[in-house]
């Protein structure tokens, strides 16, 4: 089986008092030849670092120690631990170390620093590394620790998504300049086969584990749904029409045979099933109601999965009873009452997850729309530390899966009838109206809080419907669509071209109409903007231009600048953002002076998040070492350039 490193985002776990833990939403990587050996990104004194975990002994070892944190890791068949050591701008190199320790070695020698565009290690020991330079990607090949040999270079967005078990074939996504393209390249650098265009959108999910196999697993968007497909060089795409789903899925090969573990995201929750490609059967795998943030099959028909719901921090499970790192837990369910509601809309009902504090006498509590990023993402029935913080401080929270969100099928994903951003704002406004009609909110105490694409929607809502909101927080947002396009990454430029139907030069009026900068003079509510000086996805220049336009119009926005990139791996930055945003919303939504009212701290022992914490419990070695650890659904494929 080949080993492939994806590119997840780091998140943070707030805790009572001053503690804070960082994590990322993925299970530990497992060594194919020794499934007791694992590696994971976990918290090390407020930074995300790489650890090993031995399931047989229950012991852990910290592998990396970087001032900026380390997130990307893999574990190959020879039990080498791989990680991407990067600077604050996200540029760096791959390194590896033997599982038991020893010297750190470069993945391949002779490579300049770059952006991580994929790592794949074959069972035969061949390593392929994809590195980006901001304008394209180059794939290098070699033996671990040996000299690099350049085999492929492509401009624009592209990602290395797999290597065949024998090491003779590479799978690349986007290498033909489109997210519809998957290309097979030999290790000599020649194109063997390519899927693109008429096949619709495709996502490559890795080669079959057979030692001599070249069968590639894919998800294909087709007829307003998704289906599994396979592909062998020269044989064309083979759709598995019997294995179809109405909403987004992802899949992974089992270690042996032609079986696949399928995870589906549907309406904010998840399910698992085993697909047997030879027998053409789909067998559900029982899991608790809620969200599966990650799931992976392992030898012996063992399936590891990461489960959570809104009231419960993530927990790792093994169907075979394998010992996994324990996650931090709460002494009781997260505070508040959690429910869902559906609001009628032009393209179907809009789904909202509503969390409220326990009933108190007097008026309804202030309400915060916590707007998710993406747009290829969705809010889930999953524990969220920001929801917990807000509810524990007396706020109600609405999480809206507006049009464009994943988890509701391709038609919902493509429903941008009112324009980019404006369609999503219309859904937020519709839900606001519905909540008022149901008596679940007060018209004089409603705020917005979003990060990345969610921050963009918060700014756009504040400018286009200024009479509806009493406060707004935008963290690392898009504030000027055209400027963000011109200074952003190739992947995000491709995303913008697809959403807007062209570039700012070809359809300037669409970019202007959807840009918060266009409405800056209309913003009335108090606004806090938090941005990052090294952000490549939502660049700082366009945020500064927006703040300047607000001030020129007579507004007095608050701002906060972080010396980070778009994704931070250190707890200190998450703490600073959470503290500032909570204080700002408390001040403006409760109509009380900041000096006399501060948010309540989190409930006892709060931890967890929208992804896993690798934090072991009190009896585990991470705590003894004073170290705290921390779907792949269609909207979370590594090649999808989501902003948030």
Image: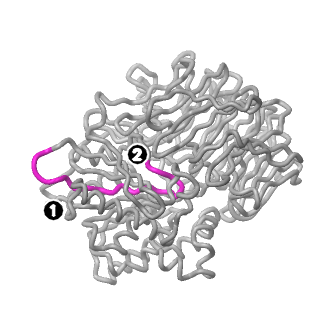
Could you tell me how many numbered marks the image carries?
2
Depth check, front residue: 366 or 614:
366
Q: Is residue 525 above or below residue 315?
A: below
Residue depicted at 70% across the width and 39% down the height: 242
- In the rendered structure, does residue 368 fall within the stretch colored magenta? yes
Depth check, front residue: 539 or 49:
539
- In the rendered structure, does residue 270 fall within the stretch colored magenta? no
Q: Is residue 314 above or below residue 353?
A: above
The stretch in magenta equals 360-379
Is 281 situated left or right of 323 in this image? right
Depth check, front residue: 287 or 411:
411
Depth check, front residue: 389 or 406:
406
- Does residue 103 appear in the picture of this structure? no
User: In the image, which disc is placed on residue 591?
Assistant: 1
Q: Is residue 525 above or below residue 602?
A: below
Is 546 situated left or right of 410 in this image? left
Disc number lying in front (2 or 1): 1
Residue 186: image location, x then y, percent:
86, 48
- The quadrant of the image that shows the N terminus is top right
Residue 51: image location, x then y, percent:
54, 32
Look at the numbered disc 2 and give the secondary structure of its residue: helix
Q: Quadrant of residue 560?
A: bottom left
User: In the image, which disc is placed on residue 464?
Assistant: none
Residue extending farthest top: 57
- Mark 1: few/some/many CA within 10 Å (<14, 14-19, 20+): few
Residue 265: image location, x then y, percent:
53, 43
Residue depicted at 72% across the width and 53% down the height: 173
Query: What colour scheme has been applied to the protein in the rendered image?
Result: one colour
Look at the numbered disc 1 and give the secondary structure of its residue: loop
Residue depicted at 31% across the width and 43% down the height: 388
């Amino acid at each position: 089986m080949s080993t492939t490193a994806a590119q997840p985002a780091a998140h943070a776990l707030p805790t009572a008092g001053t503690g804070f833990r960082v994590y990322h939403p993925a299970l530990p990587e497992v060594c194919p030849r020794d499934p007791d050996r694992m590696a994971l990104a976990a918290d090390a004194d407020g930074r995300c670092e790489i650890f090993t975990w031995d399931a047989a002994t229950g012991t852990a070892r910290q592998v990396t120690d970087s001032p900026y944190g380390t997130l990307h890791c893999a574990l190959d068949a020879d039990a080498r631990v791989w990680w991407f050591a990067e600077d604050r701008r996200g540029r760096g190199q791959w390194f590896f170390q033997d599982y038991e320790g020893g010297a750190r070695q470069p993945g391949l020698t002779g490579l300049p620093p770059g952006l991580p565009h994929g790592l794949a290690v074959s069972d035969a020991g061949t390593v392929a590394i994809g590195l980006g330079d901001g304008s394209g990607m180059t794939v290098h090949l070699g033996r671990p620790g040996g000299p690099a040999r350049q085999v492929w270079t492509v401009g624009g967005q592209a990602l290395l998504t797999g290597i065949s078990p024998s090491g003779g074939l590479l799978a690349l996504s986007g290498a033909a300049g489109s997210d519809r393209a998957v290309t097979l390249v030999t290790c000599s650098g020649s194109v063997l086969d390519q899927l693109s265009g008429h096949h619709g959108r495709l996502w490559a999910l890795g080669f079959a584990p057979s030692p001599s196999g070249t069968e590639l697993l894919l998800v294909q968007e087709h007829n307003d749904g998704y289906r599994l497909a396979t592909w062998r060089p020269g044989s064309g795409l083979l759709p598995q029409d019997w294995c179809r789903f109405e909403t987004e899925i992802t899949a992974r090969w089992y270690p042996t045979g032609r079986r696949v573990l399928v995870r589906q995201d549907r309406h904010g929750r998840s399910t698992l099933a085993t697909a047997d490609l030879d027998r053409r059967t789909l067998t559900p795998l029982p899991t608790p109601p809620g969200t599966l943030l990650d799931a992976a099959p392992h030898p012996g028909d063992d399936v590891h999965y990461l489960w959570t719901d809104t009231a419960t921090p993530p927990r790792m499970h093994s169907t075979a009873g394998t010992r996994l790192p324990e996650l931090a837990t709460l002494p009781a369910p997260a505070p508040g009452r959690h429910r869902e509601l559906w609001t009628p809309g032009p393209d179907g009902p809009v789904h909202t997850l509503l969390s409220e504090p326990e009933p108190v006498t007097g008026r309804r509590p202030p309400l915060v729309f916590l707007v998710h990023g993406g747009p290829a993402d969705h809010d889930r029935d999953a524990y969220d530390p920001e929801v917990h913080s807000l509810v524990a401080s007396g706020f109600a929270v609405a999480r809206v899966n507006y049009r464009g969100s994943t988890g509701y099928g391709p038609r919902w994903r493509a429903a941008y009838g009112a324009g980019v951003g404006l369609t999503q704002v219309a859904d937020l406004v519709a839900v606001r109206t519905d909540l008022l009609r149901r008596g679940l909110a007060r018209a004089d105490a409603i705020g917005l809080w979003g990060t990345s694409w969610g921050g963009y929607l918060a700014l756009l809502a504040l400018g286009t419907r200024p009479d509806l909101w009493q406060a707004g927080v935008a963290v690392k947002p898009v504030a000027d669509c055209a400027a963000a396009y011109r200074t952003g990454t190739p992947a995000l430029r491709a995303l913008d071209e697809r959403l807007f139907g062209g570039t700012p030069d070809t359809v300037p009026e669409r970019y202007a109409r959807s840009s918060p900068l266009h409405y800056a003079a209309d913003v009335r509510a108090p606004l806090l903007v938090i941005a990052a000086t090294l952000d490549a996805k939502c660049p700082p220049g366009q945020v500064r231009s927006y703040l300047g336009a607000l001030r020129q119009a007579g507004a007095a926005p608050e701002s906060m600048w972080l010396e980070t990139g778009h994704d931070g791996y250190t707890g200190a930055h998450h703490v600073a953002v959470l503290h500032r945003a909570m204080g700002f919303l408390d001040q403006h939504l409760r109509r009380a002076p900041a000096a006399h009212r501060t948010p309540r701290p989190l409930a006892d022992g709060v931890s967890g998040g929208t992804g896993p914490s690798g934090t072991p419990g009190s009896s585990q070695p991470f705590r003894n070492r004073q170290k705290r650890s921390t779907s792949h659904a269609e909207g979370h494929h590594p090649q999808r350039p989501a902003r948030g």
